């Protein structure tokens, strides 16, 4: 199992880059935000646990996020190739991901850190819109 990681602040273009890269390189795209929304919508135990934090306005703990990722990776093939979009977000998530990959024999092959000026990020986020029905993000 191999993976690449796209890092960068909100509005840096991770999602746009992810769409292009996953098509060109045949990677399975893993977005923890999408996974959280799906788990909550499905009413899974982890989704309900995450929802309890989100409803209080708290961040979902790192261990919950990494368990969600682990569940997703275990559902895939041993020779799968993944792309993480905006994950890991914290040093602890990176440490837990490293431990997870060590246990399952995975390898992170590339990390891309997208650098964008603060003014451009503010402009992009200010113009961002989300479809209330399907959740699609557009600008």
Image: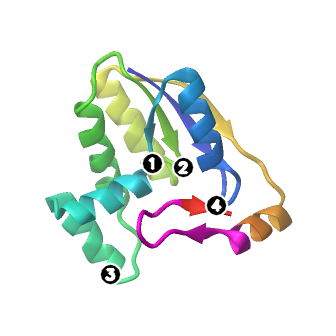
114 versus 90 height, above or below = above
Q: Residue 8: where, in percent of width, then height? A: 66, 51
> What is the spatial separation of the Cα atoms under label 2 and label 3, in whole angstroms?
22 Å
State the residue position of label 3: 55
> What is the spatial separation of the Cα atoms under label 3 and label 4, in whole angstroms?
21 Å
Name which residue lies at 24% across and 41% down. Answer: 71
Q: Which of 49 and 90 is in front in this view?
A: 49
Residues tagged 3 and 1 counted as in contact (Cβ below 8 A)? no
Q: Indicate whether residue 70 is drawn in magenta.
A: no
> What is the spatial separation of the Cα atoms under label 1 and label 2, in whole angstroms?
7 Å
> What is the spatial separation of the Cα atoms under label 4 and label 1, in whole angstroms?
13 Å
State the residue position of label 2: 86
Q: Looking at the image, tell me whether mark 4 or mark 2 is earlier in sequence order.
A: 4
Q: In this view, does 67 lie to the left or right of 108?
A: left
Q: Residue 54: where, in percent of width, then height? A: 35, 75
Where are the magenta residues, as a range? 125-136
Q: In which quarter of the image is the N terminus?
A: top left
Q: Name the front one of labels 3 and 1.
A: 1
Residues tagged 1 and 2 counted as in contact (Cβ below 8 A)? yes
SS at badge 4: loop
Q: Quadrant of the C terminus?
A: bottom right
Residues tagged 4 and 1 counted as in contact (Cβ below 8 A)? no
Name which residue lies at 25% across and 64% down. Answer: 41
State the residue position of label 1: 31
């Amino acid at each position: 199992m191999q993976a690449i990681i796209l890092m960068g602040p909100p509005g840096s273009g991770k999602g746009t880059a992810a769409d292009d890269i996953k098509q060109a390189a045949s990677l399975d795209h893993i977005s923890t935000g999408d996974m959280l929304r799906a788990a909550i919508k499905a009413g899974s135990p982890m989704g309900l646990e995450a929802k309890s934090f989100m409803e209080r306005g708290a961040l979902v703990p790192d261990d919950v996020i990494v368990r969600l990722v682990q569940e997703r990776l275990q559902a895939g093939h041993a020779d799968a190739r993944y792309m993480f979009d905006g994950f890991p977000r914290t040093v602890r998530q990176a440490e837990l991901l490293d431990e997870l990959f060590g246990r399952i024999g995975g390898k992170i092959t590339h990390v891309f850190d997208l650098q964008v000026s603060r003014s451009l990020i503010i402009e992009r986020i200010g113009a961002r819109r989300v479809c209330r029905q399907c959740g699609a993000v557009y600008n």
